[in-house]
Amino acid sequence: MANGILDIETASRLKRFYFRSPSRVRGRKAGIHKSLYKGISPDFLEYKEYNRGDELRQVDWRLYGRHDRLYVKKFEDEVNLAWCILVDSSASMGYGGGDSRKLRYAESLAATLAYLLLRQGDSVGAGSFSGKDLSLMPPRAGNSYIAPILEKLESLAPEGGTALAGPLLKALEVLKQDASFVIISDLLTDESEIEKALQLLKAAKKDAVIFHVLHEDEIDFGFRGPIEFLDMESQEKVIVDADAIRDGYRKRIREFTGRLKLLCHEYESRYVLSPTSRPVEEPLIEIADK
Amino acid sequence: MNFSFLNPLFLIGIAAVALPVIAHLISRKSGVVKKFPAVRFLIASRGDASARSRLKDLLLLLLRALVIVLLVLVFAKPALFTFAPAGSVGPRMLAIIVDNSFSMGYGGNFERAIDKASELIETLPDGSFGLAAPLVALGEGRLSPADGREALRNELRGIKISNTFTDNEKRLEDALAALEGAPGQTKEVVFITDLQKNGWHGGKTAGDWLRIIDVSEEAYPANRAVTGIDAGYGKDAVTLGLSVSNFSDKPQEQLLATVSAGGEDLSAYLDIPPGGTVTNELTIPGEYISGDMTLDKAQDKPSGEDRPALKEGSAAIPKDSLAIDDTRYFVLSDRSDFNVLIVDGDPREDARLSETYYLARAAETISEATGAHITVKDNDSFLVEKLSGYDLLFLANVGDVTEGRAKELGEFAVRGGTAVIFLGERVRASSYNALLKDLLPAELITEVEEETKIVPPPQSIFPEEVGERLSRAAVRKHIKAVPVPGAEVLLGLEDGDPFLIKKSLGKGSVFLVTSTADTSWNNFPITTVFLPVVKGFLDMPGSADEGKRNFVVGDTVPLDVLERTEGTEVISPSGKRYALDTGAALFENASEPGIYTVSESGKDYYKFSVNVDPRESNLAKLEAAPGAPEAPAGKGLVKVYRDIWRYFLWGAVMLFISEAAARAVFS
């Protein structure tokens, strides 16, 4: 357990959930993801205890007759997958305090997901991006890899701006293997930048899950009276009467998230709005196979 | 009407209008600075809200600024001002007395006085306190200060011209006294008058508190007036002494004077020198008096009653600028005699030794001038004499008085007769005290024999020169007397005992002289003051009131009532009827000149006339106004301010409420 960003209890509650790639992947090891290469290695690999969601036709009934337990036969055509979890560590992610701090929430989300992915046999790499910088640990399999991932995530500090396309391009260049991307960010950058990143992912035929992390204040804007706001990235100042603009702001943020959802849908990425007030397990369940 | 500020320095406070703006800016600068990731959405949202917000901010800013401006203006005391004559500035404690004596009817004096008073009221500054009252009160006459111009306007509207001669100074002093209860240090009485000389007693009321405004337009207003009608009764005719005065500096020639009586007009042309009075005798023949023509006695004489018959008429001259005194009314009474009864209690063959010798001589001397009839009776004759035919009764050393006679003496006095009682050897104190208890002004004690002198009291009823000579009268013997309550000692002795005591009884009077009417006890009858004193008895109020038919406006008219006052009423010349109060045979509403009729139980009983006081007809003006002069126009004009800051305060309050409402609406 690494200082609380990985909540074991939450992870335990999610251990029956699997996170599958929606498309076929080029996995080299056995896994739960459908291989891009069908029938290339039909040999029996191992038995796996039956879990809900397993196909019944793969159940070894004879083994069931001997042991009175359900096992499914695993063949080489179900391969593992490499995941690249990218956490936005820009300055804007530093908003909030305690567990509701956006970066903390992103770290927790990333750690839990990494734990679960490693546990289901996938390779997981983790990194962060801030401005145009990218810091990435290449994906590796094995439960023991969770420790360096947690260490990496805990070391993140909010700074710099939010630029999505640049770091993503770097990640695509760095990664030698096929991987699905998980991007955890507040996405407070130009929508064109976001669209550009989604275009890149689609062009590279990468599955992607976008966790859109927002603080409750950013959604509800519960401030009162005249306040001078300082942008955490651009340092731009603005004095507004919070009461006067609340409705307008809420409307704009709703429109923003709505557009992002559409944009992700357009580029075949999955969009999950993840307010920091929402328990970490909820957005994860949203993307899991049930 | 101009606009100004009484405290203009406070206008500096207008700078406070910047406070809301500064407060807004300060709140922005010193307010919460919050780091926030989604500022770009704030900027975008601000654009949406800015239009509404700007409207709200602008409106609130405007309201707040206006509140401040109005509050500053309240402190700066905005005021409207007009220009008014100097001396009329600032809140004033003012009594405005309008001369409404009938001389103000000359030309347009009274109207000008009302206009001037109205002008004064309108230019009174806010906060002024005062009263507006007539010089002659027609009603209650109470002087009560009021607050505000509207109250003064109402009081002014109630002022009407009267027909009365006035005593200016008392009324003005009363007005000043009425202001005593009003706030403010300086009290002021403004008297708007024609400045007629009559009515002032030498300008003794001069003081800072009195300001006189002369509204007459002439230095010496010319006026003619019928100033008197004296009737002389003869056997076959009545002679009317008609007095007409010329109150001007020019002679009046061939002025037609007409006496109208019984449908007949008697005329005369009069030449009157400037400032002079001419008396012309006009004779009404006997047939008009006793015949059956218009002045028939039967018209006025109640049937079956032994009452005097009465006739009335008027004397007039052509109307001039003051018309009210150009006609004078009169009522004739055939009660022409003034009868005096002298009762001698100690008659002697030698008249010079008689008790009433000096008294009779004095009365006869006076009767030559007054036409009084003198009758001398002894004690016995007095006891059977009918007293109702007499006006004045002298009892000199009358020792024998019966109980019935004593009662009749009381009734005689109550009816209006005057009784003068001299004492002497024949008078028994105990008998007098018992029989004349209700009549005597004093209780008789005992004879005192000592040399003493008469000492007039400080407030003597006699003229000053008489008072000085009284001290020469020596009294050797007198009867000590103790005045009864209500009696008045008119003359006293050196030893402190009273010498002459008066007691009013009904409409008449009773006088008691504690010594004799002859020289046996004193030398008073042979002093030079005896005659004036005896004449004084004849002139005493109450003497011969019965039968008096001519009065002046404002007089209290004693009425000859038949039996009771219930059902008796007086009809004024204008037809107004006045019912008499129960038990009061006095008429106090003689405010209108003309012929009044006394009616009992719906039947006319007799008439009396009421005329204006001839003193008021002389319009000669006072040379110098007593008291503070009117603020002259030469001093220029000064600003008279009218505060309007209250309106600004209300405006500020309303705006404050509006501001709160606007905030509620926009939030």
Image: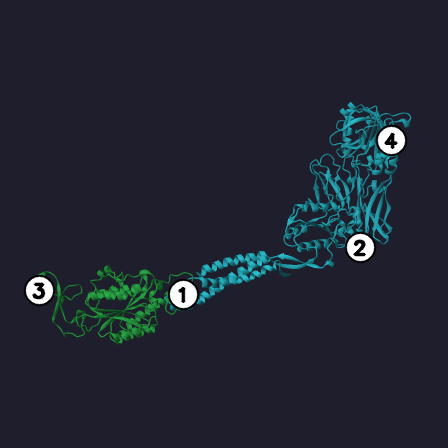
Chain colours: A green, B cyan
Image-quadrant location for residue B118:
bottom right
Position of A14 with respect to B363 (left or right) is left
Q: Chain of mark 2?
A: B
Q: CA distance from mark 3 to mark 4?
A: 179 Å
Kind of element beneath mark 4:
helix
**Which residue is under mark 3?**
A62
**Which residue is under mark 2?**
B219
Q: Chain of mark 3?
A: A
Nearer to us: label 3 or label 2: 3
| Residue in view at x 37 percent, y 69 percent | A233
What amino acid is found at the position of numbered circle 3 in the picture?
Arg
| Residue in view at x 76 percent, y 54 percent | B216
What amino acid is found at the position of numbered circle 2 in the picture?
Ala
Image-quadrant location for residue A255:
bottom left
**Which residue is under mark 1?**
A229
**Which residue is under mark 4?**
B525
Marked residue nearer the N-terminal end (2 or 4): 2
A138 and B573: which is toward the camera: A138
B484 and A61: which is toward the camera: A61
